[in-house]
């Protein structure tokens, strides 16, 4: 080879190397979202979570207002007036004469006693902040569960898609064999037509499976609030790396951990506490209230003959007072408020019982689902092993002319169903197990 040829080869080699490095870098830069990354992103960016955070901020403002209500108020007021009127002079003529006046006052007041309502209002508002923070935790937990379900739906759809692709591959291979047997006179045109029909059906099912996977990815993308134009690629772990524990956690242990850690349980207890404080606030209206107030004021008037400073100084006035308000008859409004507050306590207590009851029901259902799915998975693994062996044998017998097309397709369908049953039961068991762990206050991850 001459020098020009070697140079050309060297240049081409260099170009292809650059292209390879560039494509590898692009592939490496492509982000693949794991389940934990999806959850963490959703907790930060989901709109409902953001709304819950704003609610917490708003309630904290109410708490700051409740704290400030114990402080004295201070206000300044001023009025500026101009008046004009006609008056008769010594010659009997009427002339218009104008005058200008101004007043200035500084006022303050403070509640000295009102049955402890200010302190109790602050306590109740502090409870409200904690409840809204727990509501935020509930929203984040809900998002975490929703993202987990959506992510596992994707994994199942992806694994099922592999099964459907294998189904098409088997149909293509079997259709070719049947065509060869038909051309050799060993199979009828009906057998060949049945195989063609099955291949068409499998290709259609493959298209449906691809759409299902795309829809599952879209559902997760929407949960994460990712823009429609932004690329999103989930991470698909090796199915063999996804293992299921043989033993589930004890039901009582899961429930005990949930009672101690779940935000909805804590919130229901705070609701009772808030209702009890509300009842004390309502009772405070039976008691008298004492308010102190003070003010300082002055004014000025044009045409008085005094300078502005002297007028403000001469008209300076100060007031200090204490007012007492004693409720005598309030047309049953206070008694009604107290009774309704007591009803709120009872309702909050019943609500707390119901929260714990629903929590137990949820955990029991998850536990039963996990046990059932694990049993199904173990049975599906065994069934798949024997179904695959049976299908292989029937396939060989079909090629030898011992089995007909209907028997082969029936056996193949049973084999594919066994594959799908294994995948479905595995991801159902995995979801139930992860949720049980989540109710034990453990973060979800694969």
Image: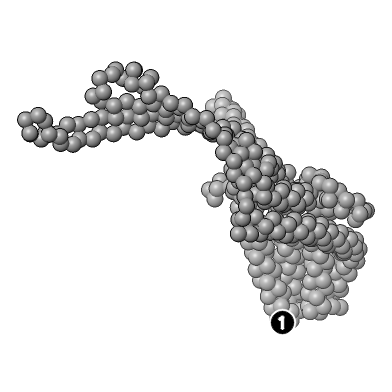
Q: Which residue is nearer to you in this view: 135 or 185?
A: 135
Quadrant in which residue 397 is drawn:
bottom right
Residue for badge 1: 190
Q: Is residue 410 above or below residue 173?
A: below
Q: Secondary structure at mark 1?
A: helix
Say whether residue 195 is visible.
Answer: yes
Is residue 277 or residue 319 the one in the foreground? Answer: 319
Q: Residue at x 37, y 31 (%)?
A: 78
- Residue shown at 15%/36% (left/top)? 86
**Which color scheme is applied?**
one colour
Residue 234 seen anywhere in this rendered image of the structure: no
Q: Which quadrant, please, contains the N terminus?
A: top right
For the point 90% across and 56% down, the residue is 251
Question: In which quadrant of the rendered view does residue 98 lie?
Answer: top left
Q: Is residue 295 above or below residue 175?
A: above
Q: In x, y percent, where is residue 85?
A: 18, 36
| Left or right: 385 as drawn, with respect to 127 | right
Label 1 packing within 10 angstroms: few (<14), some (14-19), many (20+): few
Front position in the image: 113 or 394:
113
Q: Is residue 127 above or below residue 420?
A: above
């Amino acid at each position: 080879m001459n020098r020009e040829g070697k140079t050309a080869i060297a240049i081409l080699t260099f170009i292809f190397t650059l292209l390879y490095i560039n494509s590898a870098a692009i592939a490496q830069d492509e982000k693949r979202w794991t389940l934990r990354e999806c959850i963490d992103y959703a907790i930060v960016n989901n709109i409902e979570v953001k709304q819950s955070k704003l609610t917490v901020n708003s309630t904290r403002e109410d708490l700051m207002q409740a704290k400030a209500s114990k402080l004295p108020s201070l206000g300044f007021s001023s009025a500026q007036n101009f008046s004009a009127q006609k008056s008769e002079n010594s010659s009997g003529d009427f002339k218009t004469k104008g005058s200008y006046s101004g007043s200035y006052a500084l006022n303050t007041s403070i509640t000295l006693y009102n049955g402890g309502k200010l302190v109790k209002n602050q306590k109740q508002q502090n409870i409200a902040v904690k409840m809204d923070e727990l509501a935020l935790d509930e929203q984040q937990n809900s998002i975490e569960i929703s993202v987990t379900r959506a992510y596992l739906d994707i994994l199942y759809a992806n694994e099922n898609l592999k099964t459907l692709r294998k189904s098409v591959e088997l149909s293509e291979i079997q259709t070719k064999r049947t065509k060869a047997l038909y051309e050799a006179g060993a199979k009828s045109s009906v057998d060949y037509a049945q195989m063609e029909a099955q291949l068409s059906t499998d290709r259609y099912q493959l298209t449906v499976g691809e759409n299902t996977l795309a829809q599952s990815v879209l559902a997760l993308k929407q949960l994460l609030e990712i823009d429609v134009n932004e690329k999103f690629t989930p991470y698909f772990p090796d199915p063999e790396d996804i293992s299921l524990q043989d033993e589930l956690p004890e039901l009582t242990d899961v429930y005990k951990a949930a009672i101690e850690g779940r935000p909805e349980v804590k919130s229901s207890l705070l609701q009772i506490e808030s209702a009890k404080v509300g009842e004390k606030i309502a009772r405070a209206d039976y008691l008298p209230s004492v308010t102190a107030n003070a003010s300082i004021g002055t004014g000025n008037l044009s045409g008085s003959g005094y300078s502005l400073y002297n007028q403000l100084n001469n008209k300076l006035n100060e007031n200090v007072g204490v007012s007492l308000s004693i409720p005598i008859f309030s047309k049953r409004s206070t008694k009604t408020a107290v009774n309704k507050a007591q009803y709120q306590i009872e309702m909050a207590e019943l609500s707390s019982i119901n929260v714990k009851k629903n929590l137990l029901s949820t955990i029991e259902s998850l536990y039963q689902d996990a046990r059932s799915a694990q049993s199904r998975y173990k049975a599906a693994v065994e069934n798949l092993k024997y179904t695959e062996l049976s299908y292989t044998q029937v396939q060989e017998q079909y090629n030898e002319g011992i089995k007909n097309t209907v028997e082969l397709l029936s056996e193949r369908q049973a084999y594919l169903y066994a594959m799908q049953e294994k995948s479905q039961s595995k991801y159902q068991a995995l979801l139930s197990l992860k949720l049980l762990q989540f109710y034990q206050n453990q973060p979800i991850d694969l």
